Image (cartoon, helix red, strand yellow):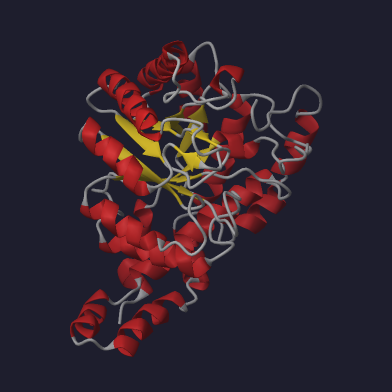
């Protein structure tokens, strides 16, 4: 039987990047809602992210989205983040909001449009050089709505050519991380719709091209942990974008829709060597809070990941392997379920206190006065929001 005491030291390895855009205003496809205290600048986003890390010690990096987080001096922004106790992490490109990308970006039939998209990624790489970021993450909205609208094979060929040019520009210690998404905004086909397409493109590029798995980017019922297993086997799982969805890309708090799924994913991450000081797999949240408060939403998410990681570490892997080898169906399932049903929250509260952290970060934030402070200080100005 694995005990919490035997796995507690491993919890210190956990690091989850926060997305800068999670602290801005978001909403549904019909309305973006404003809230008091929302950041007006990327510096204020970083301050909010630093507050999450201060209370949890789980979020030492902040991912940026370009051009949403564009500044004149990225070295100064890096220093500002460091002074707050966080570092700048993944740089996310954006080729889905300019009018010129209506019919695609890196896959567009017009070479001039593809050139603009490639040059944007070159700009992102230069930003990485200034911020010290390792990963350039690419998510494409490219696709078509109707059969016959585009040459499916031709679009893949153009994607491969565009990615190869971008890959050639990244540094020896940097990575190109290619995300995939089942559908939306294109509905007939998406140019990178699944892990297999992302893997095929990355494998052709080289060892520094890896796949990003967004947990909300799959068809309902998809066995996501199986995808995790395959990508870890192949050495191509680069990062996670953690969130939850009921139907599609809902960007809900991770673990809120299906906690057992999150547990199963994290068990395979732990079992496959994707967790710990020697792992290259990056954990990141990707959320746009629609109705919930921004900072508590991020705190809740990182705590959910921590809780399910603890449960995954509690699986008695020796006993499970023995049951599996004996074809003990119910015994094997019971070992997994015993770990999942273990209430680790009291032990985690004690673990935090032993490290000088609040036992309940959610309550600590509510009692800190930080929310009231930013609501007062950030009155006026233009609030940051999705797409800005």
Q: Is residue 235 left or right of residue 266?
A: left
Residue 193, horizontal then vertical, whole percent: 43, 44
Q: Residue at x 35, y 65 (%)?
A: 267
Q: Residue at x 64, y 24 (%)?
A: 41
Q: Is residue 363 left or right of residue 172?
A: right
For this orientation, the residue located farthest to the front is 148
Please indicate, yes or no, whether residue 68 appears anywhere in the rendered image.
Answer: yes
Residue 15, horizontal then vertical, whole percent: 41, 47
Q: Is residue 334 left or right of residue 144?
A: left
Location of residue 54 with respect to 7 vertically, above or below:
above
Location of residue 346 with respect to 376 vertically, above or below:
below
Residue 7, horizontal then vertical, whole percent: 32, 67
The image quadrant where one finds the C terminus is top right
Q: Is residue 27 left or right of residue 251?
A: right
Camera-nearest residue between 233 and 266: 233
Please indicate, yes or no, whether residue 269 appears anywhere in the rendered image.
Answer: no
Quarter-of-image position of residue 255: bottom right
Location of residue 337 with respect to 40 vertically, above or below:
below
Residue 113, horizontal then vertical, whole percent: 47, 15
Q: Residue at x 70, y 52 (%)?
A: 366
Camera-nearest residue between 116 and 285: 116
Quarter-of-image position of residue 97: top right
Q: Residue at x 71, y 52 (%)?
A: 367
Quarter-of-image position of residue 37: top right
Location of residue 275 with respect to 144 vertically, above or below:
below
The image quadrant where one finds the N terminus is bottom left
Q: How many marks?
A: 0
């Amino acid at each position: 039987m694995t005990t919490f005491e035997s796995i507690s030291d491993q919890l210190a390895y956990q690091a989850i990047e926060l997305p800068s855009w999670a602290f801005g205003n978001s909403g549904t496809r019909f309305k973006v809602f404003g809230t008091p205290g929302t950041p007006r600048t990327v510096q204020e986003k970083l301050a909010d992210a630093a507050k999450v890390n201060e209370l949890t010690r789980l979020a030492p990096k902040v991912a940026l989205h370009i051009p949403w987080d564009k500044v004149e001096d990225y070295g100064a922004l890096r220093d500002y983040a460091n002074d707050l106790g966080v570092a700048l992490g993944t740089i996310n490109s954006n080729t889905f909001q300019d009018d010129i990308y209506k019919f695609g970006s890196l896959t567009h039939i017009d070479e001039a449009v593809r050139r603009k998209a490639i040059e944007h990624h070159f700009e992102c790489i230069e930003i990485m050089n200034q911020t010290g970021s390792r990963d350039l993450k690419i998510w494409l909205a490219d696709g078509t709505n109707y059969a016959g609208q585009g040459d499916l094979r031709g679009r893949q060929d153009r994607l491969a050519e565009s990615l190869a040019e971008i890959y050639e520009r990244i540094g020896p210690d940097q990575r190109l991380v290619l995300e995939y998404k089942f559908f939306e905004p294109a509905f007939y086909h998406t140019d990178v719709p699944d892990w297999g397409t992302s893997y095929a493109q990355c494998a052709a590029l080289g060892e520094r091209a890896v796949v990003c798995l967004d947990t909300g980017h799959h068809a309902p019922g998809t066995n996501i942990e199986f995808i995790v297993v395959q990508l870890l086997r192949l050495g191509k799982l680069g990062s996670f974008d953690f969130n939850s969805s009921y139907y599609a890309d809902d960007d809900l708090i991770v673990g809120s829709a299906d906690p057992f799924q999150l547990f199963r994913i994290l068990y395979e991450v732990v079992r496959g060597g994707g967790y710990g000081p020697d792992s290259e797999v990056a954990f990141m949240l990707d959320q746009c809070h629609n109705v919930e408060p921004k900072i508590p939403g991020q705190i809740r998410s990182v705590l959910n990941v921590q809780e399910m990681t603890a449960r995954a570490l509690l699986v008695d892997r020796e006993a499970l392997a023995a049951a599996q080898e004996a074809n003990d169906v119910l015994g094997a399932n019971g070992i997994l379920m015993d770990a999942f049903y273990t209430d680790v929250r009291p032990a985690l509260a004690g673990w935090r206190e032993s490290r000088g952290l609040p036992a309940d970060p959610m309550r600590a934030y509510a009692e800190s006065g930080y929310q009231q402070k930013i609501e007062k200080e950030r009155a006026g100005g233009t609030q940051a929001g999705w797409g800005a």
